[in-house]
Amino acid sequence: MDQLRFVSQVLVIGSGIAGCSCALTLAEAGCEVHLLVPTEGLDGGNTEMAQGGIVYSADPDDQKSLQKDMYVAGHDLNSDEAVKFLAEESGAVVKRLLIEQLGVPFDLNADGGLDMTLEGGHAVPRILHCADYTGRSIIEHLHQAVSKHPGITILPRRSAVDLVTTEHHAQSKSYRYSLKNNCLGAYAYNDEKGCVELDIPRMTEKDTGGVGQVFLYSTNNPRATGSGISMAHRAGARLANMEYMQFHPTGLFNHQQQIPLLTEALRGEGAQVIDEKGERFVFRYDKRGELAPRDVVSQAIVTEMLSTGKDHMYLDCSTLDCSDVPARFPTVFESCRKIGIDMRTQPLPIVPVAHYFCGGILVDLHGRTTLDRLYAVGECSCTGIHGANRLASTSLLEALLWGVSAAENIAERLKTAKRDECVFAEIRDWKEPGTEHNDDPALIAQDWATIRNTMWNYVGIVRTEARLRRAFADLRDLSSHLHDFYKHTPLSQPLVHLCHGCQTAYLITQAALRNK
């Protein structure tokens, strides 16, 4: 039976804030968009779990201050061009798309103006928020707009497997000797039909999210396995800053795979990090205490845990400058209530968790990668604004700004870009690698346990060369094993995610070893 093929102007992979803002902007420019998502409905990925807020800086003086804060948080490894672009251009996009067009209900102050809160690493309050579920509110409004737009076709229950490129998949002799590699689309696994499909657009944009699930403790959704990064690497796109994983200092300690996040805004509004004796120990590591950037607070907590032998520290929220805690922090309050803690009177057990990936697929100010016709936006990309560590509440902003910027650039290119029908016609259908149905859930679970424990213990918050070499050897062996396993086993969604996750973990470890 012939493989099912889709033809569109633009293929957008992923439906978080970056993918949806890109798809919506493209559709409103008159472009035909296919939106590929792994779940039955639209999936917000990590966007819907972003609690704190989104930076909104409209004053030129504050924009200069914002740039300084990003450099301090990023250890001055940021891209000058990207930092300036975000500081100066993002405010207009937030106002036009989120406030005016979508009507996201950001909280207001007593005077009826936008309520700005303070978070760690920021010199002044400049964070817009919807209580403590800002990401969920933004993505719900984006999903409503995307679902209603006639120019967007949603393709559900599909997981991207590989990018299609002229170098790897074109059969024409002319492409064999071409110096330029082009992205021609993607192979995607249809979970409902159990087969691989091919989508061949004129431009491809990826919003596949982060890598948090390759670590033992993470705030990320279960599909954040670095799929877009591993696909881009195999296709030949350049990656950058792969060693820079940001660990959020305050995850609600438990033994779940996905740890509830305790938003940065808690510390911004007065919550204190303490040990079991009630002492605020972070000031011993940094004079800014709990309001130091995330990497500083995370390292302080981990160092204290190692020195005392404890598996967690505490966050005291009784000091919050807030009269109605359940109303201001409903998500956090409910997470605590579920494990029997009243955050108003009891300290919360905390542990640093893998939260945000500062590296990824290298892109320019328009989301263009080094592979022609391939764009990347959101957490899977590396714009350079974060450097070695992300400033709080810049993730939603980066995804929104680059999603819109990429869409505008794609729409402009589509006015003159032509499709080479010959090369698209000759792309081969996906060939199933094997026929042995041996993808035992127990085997996959064990491989994931190996990846996550290896990354947490050896490539986590505190790294040494000895630990990294051990991780390199263990992941190299597992990667080799998975390649052999893959050759004999028909594809399934769990196997796709496992292969992506293993390769991503291996790439992070290699980058960490190179960075002395």
Image: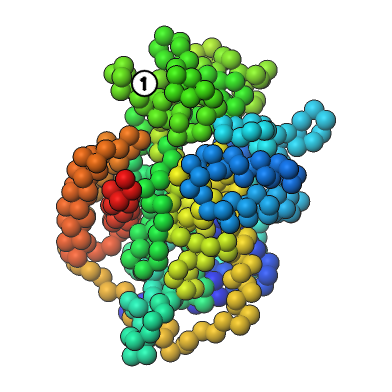
- Is any atom of residue 452 visible in this view? no
- Is any atom of residue 211 visible in this view? yes
Depth check, front residue: 220 or 297 = 297
Residue 497 locus on image (x, y percent): 33, 54
Task: Identify which residue is drawn at 55% across, 58% down.
Answer: 19
Image quadrant assignment for residue 162: bottom left
Q: What residue type is labelled 1?
A: Glu
Disc 1 marks which residue?
304
Residue 226 locus on image (x, y percent): 38, 53
In the drawing, does residue 108 fall left or right of residue 192? right
Task: Identify which residue is drawn at 59% across, 39% down.
Answer: 69
> Which residue lies most toward the top here?
277
Q: As displayed, is residue 132 above or below residue 438? A: above
State the SS at label 1.
helix
Residue 252 locus on image (x, y percent): 44, 27
Q: As displayed, is residue 257 above or below residue 211? A: above
